[in-house]
Image (tube, rainbow, N blue to C red):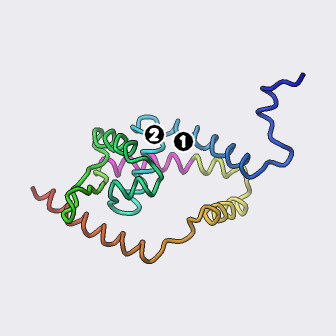
Amino acid sequence: MSNPEHRSTQPPPFASLGWALATLLRDYQKQVEAALTGLPGGGRAFMVMSLVQRETCQSQIAIAERIALDKTTLTYLLDGLEKEDLIRRVSDPNDRRSRHINLTPKGAKALVGFSQAVEHIEEGILARLDPKDAALFRVSLSKAAGLEAVSEESRAEQTDSAHICKTVVSADEAC
């Protein structure tokens, strides 16, 4: 009789794409979650903060859609981040039902440290490849994931969003 425990941990002779991606993702997530200890919401919160920092002041709805999170789950993440003074929600002056998310100075500083920790993990994982293969893997993975380009329309929306947020943040800080 074969040992089912042994069978479940052995990859097929030529690992399928799904098997290889799942194995890599589990390893990556385990290391990242350990590095993000202390961040309420762990890896999901890191994704939210990174998106807010990179794309300037996203609405809660846009963030939920962009990272494929349920709006309720996102609300809990934002509550935890706001409680720790890492983000701030600001009402959109054009639509009071919509709220934009901004990093606080404390959040921006924390994100730098967490980003460095995640970058170190990524370098460690990619060190399994030679540098040329690692660079090619990053490019190929981005292409396969459909992340290689941002449309002009998306850039224009980000610029409009940034203008609204800067106006609101400046007005809030003056109060």
Q: Check the image and name the residue furthest to the top.
A: 1
Total marks placed: 2
Q: Residues within 10 Å of mark 1 (few under 14, many from 20)?
A: many
Q: With respect to residue 66, does 70 lie above or below?
A: above
Residue 162 placement (x, y as % from top left) = 30, 67
Q: Horizontal and vertical percent for residue 161?
A: 30, 67
Residue drawn at the location 60% of the way across and 50% of the way down: 122
Q: Is residue 63 left or right of residue 10?
A: left
* Residue receiving disc 2: 42
Cβ atoms under marks 1 and 2 closer than 8 Å: yes
The answer to if 63 sits in the magenta stretch is: no
Q: Residue furthest left?
A: 175
Q: Residue at x 72, y 63 (%)?
A: 132
> On residue 146, which mark appears?
none
- Residue segment shown in magenta: 106-120
Residue type at numbered disc 2: Gly
Q: Nearer the viewer, residue 17 or 136?
A: 17
Q: Secondary structure at mark 1?
A: helix
Between the residue at mark 1 and the residue at mark 2, the CA separation in whole angstroms equals 8 Å
In the image, residue 39 above or below residue 148: above
